[in-house]
Amino acid sequence: MDNPKMEVSIVQLRGITKRFPGLVANDSINLEVTRGEIHAIVGENGAGKSTLMKILTGLYQPDGGEIYLNGTRVEISGPRQAIGLGIGMVHQHFMLIPRFTVLENIILGSEPARRGVLKDKEARGLVEELCRRYDFKLESQVRVWDLSVGQQQRVEILKVLYRGAEILILDEPTAVLAPQEVRELFVNLRNLKGQGKTIIFISHKLDEVLEIADRISVLRRGRMVGTVMAKETDKRQLSEMMVGRPVFLKTEKSQPRVGEERLKVKDLTVLGNLGRPAVRQVNLTILAGEIYGIAGIEGNGQSELIEALMGLRKILSGQVLIKGQLTSDKSVQEIRALGVGYVPEDRHRRGLILPMMVWENAVLGLHRLRDFSRPTGLNFKNIFAHTNRLVREFDIRLGSVDLPVRNLSGGNQQKVILAREMSRDPGLIIASQPTRGLDIGATEFVHQQLIKAREQGRAVLVVSADLEEVLSLSDRVGVIYNGEIVAEFRPEEVTPEEIGHYMLGTKSLLREGVGA
Amino acid sequence: MFLSELLASAIRMSIPILLAALGAVYSERGGVVNIGLEGMMITGSFWGAVGSYYYGPFGGMILAIVAACLMALIHAIVAVTFRVDQIVSGVALNILAYGAARFASIALFQKATMSPHVDGFTPWNIPLLDQITFLKPLVTNLSPIIILAFLLVPLTHWVIQRTVFGLRLRSVGENPLAADTLGIKVYPLRYSGVLISGVLAGLAGAYLAVEHTGMYVEGMTQGKGYIALAAMIFGNWSPVGAMGAALLFGFAESLSFRVVEGGAIPYQFIKMIPYVLTLVVLAGVLRRTTPPAADGIPYERGGE
């Protein structure tokens, strides 16, 4: 009976289909996950990974197909039932309450209690026992807002373990982590696997998947392309399975030919929303013809820095010079008129007005220019000609320019922004998280455009949470931690691990002894 | 003697603010802004007087609580279930309460603006302490509601911090989506927060009419619902903090009465003291407080 060689399918999906209006998100998908393995599911954005996992956790009901757990057919009606069946989801965007303690976050919803009164000691004992068993280093009484992103993720994992999960689904768990934190996460995951837990690991980062997974299943456009053993495949094969065609994994670029100073930041200090300095004494110089990348874990002052450069946030002290001109007394419009192209980090809240038409978005902020306006209103003829030219040049896929920009895919939305910002021949381009949420094809396109801009002699500032992206694009990289640029490198002279130390604040060129 | 009398009056003035502010703690920790406290207090003051007139003070309290709870239920239905802007709903409630009280007053007492005199509870003295001359004004002639209000402070703290209900209530005020994914029912918890605030605001109004004044007078709440809201904010959404703030506002009000008796400054200015203090305190403090993260934000299931 207890033959260890015999593989037991803990999860089995047969012919799972899920349709949304105008789209088949999951097209009769078959998947088998073996007990005690780490099974990765990879695919581009929109390949159907999230939909599949939402079906497995009961957030969606499939239109067709069957789910088997340990060989028994089940219907999963909701997250609560899923966890009852031992399926726990660790969300990409943490579902934590920052003001609550680690303990409160973990027990919330299934609290040890007698007649409605919390049994604190028992709760603490349970959580500490969990931490011990899986070797998680966490203090149960610390508030979550004092934790690092990696620690918060551990709380999320503990939440599902506390609820007795046997199958853990992790949705893009490394997207927000520094390289060191990824190491720790992998150690934790191997520990869990060692204790017999099954892990479903969703990702699009192939290096990581190849390192941690036992088997890898690839989804493309809602269909299951296949399942491979991690040991028997490589990055090239996987990316071809994902995209359906060969992919250039390396960004090709020539030696930089740098020119004059386009952006100079001197001792810049900017306050954050909480009234404390979010950017501290930052110094930066970016030359024409180079890409300067800012690496860092999100929330270390990147957003505030960019907002200050664009005139969206008040400068507390220090100076910003664009093409040699002080920006402190200039409005956003005047700063843009100096020749600054801006790709904001959140294209839905800034950068586009979703309900407005594509042509309206294509001239947003430029509508005052003589080309696009007349004394009596807008010059529609020129605006449409301009928009159609951009659509051609940037290969924007759309039904019509006279449709709301909301209807476009994320990649095409980003192309609209990029096209608009490039159309003014900017001397400086500021791009914040330029490929967030884009699929491989669109990411490639954005990268090519940024490199093209550099070759045309523009200065480019790229801020990204994706370290790999920063390293592959940039000529120089600055690492931001706690509002300070703590180090500057050329990408070829540094390893991701080295940069990770600076991102986590465990190392600093500026001052020693920065600790958590 | 002057000081202890001043303090005694400050405590009495602070009770309606304290009760309503404690109510606001429940509502707002659960994520619902309750600017309708003023209306619930108006309702409580009127029906408290009515109940007391017909059935005695205990009946007054019960009737006030039931009536204010109905107002709170309207707020919950409109602001939680139908996700209308919570400020708009609250303000509408205040206007409704004012009109409803006037209407009912004409119907029951044939007078729009006041009720006949009503009897309150028999006041209590705290034994032993009432023998000390200095403390005498503080510990004699106390309404039981005063004692109840102060007992509610630690009780509220305990409920919010130490019970399953409190933990879950706080969770829906901080991150309802997270709570929902853990199987916590967001709407019932938000309803109960709002309804508890109705109970306490009703009690606050009834105290004002039955215990403090001995009758209902139109406009007798004088914006105390708003001041209670300010006290709760000043107290950083905690019951103990709200008590401190309520005592401060109560003190300002009783001080203004004393100074009026002095007569050196035109009394209109003196009467402004509590309101000016409210503004100053809020302007100075608001930046440093941290409201529950989802306070005032309606929750919609499946909404991104």
Image (tube, grey):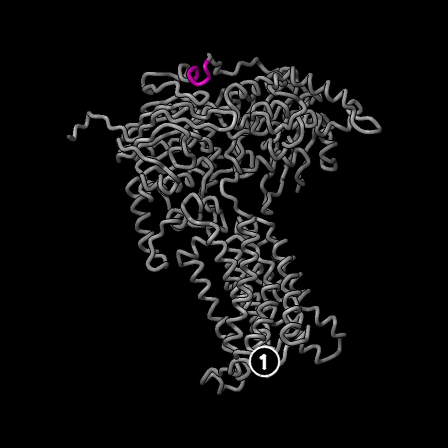
Q: Position of residue A159 (x, y in %)?
A: 37, 43
Chain letter for the residue marked with disc 1 in the picture: B
* Most foreground residue, B98 or A38: B98
Q: Is residue A228 above or below residue B138?
A: above
Q: Is residue A278 above or below residue B237?
A: above
* Most foreground residue, B152 or A15: A15
Residue B160 occupies which quadrant of the picture?
bottom left
Q: Residue at x 57, y 79 (%)?
A: B53
Q: Is residue B293 rendered to the left or right of residue B227?
A: left
Q: Is residue A250 rendered to the left or right of residue B44?
A: left
Three-letter amino acid code of the residue under disc 1: Val
* Most foreground residue, A95 or B200: B200
Task: Verify whether residue A243 appears in magenta.
Answer: yes
Q: Residue at x 60, y 43 (%)?
A: A272
Q: Position of residue B266 (x, y in %)?
A: 76, 74
The segment highlighted magenta reads A239-244
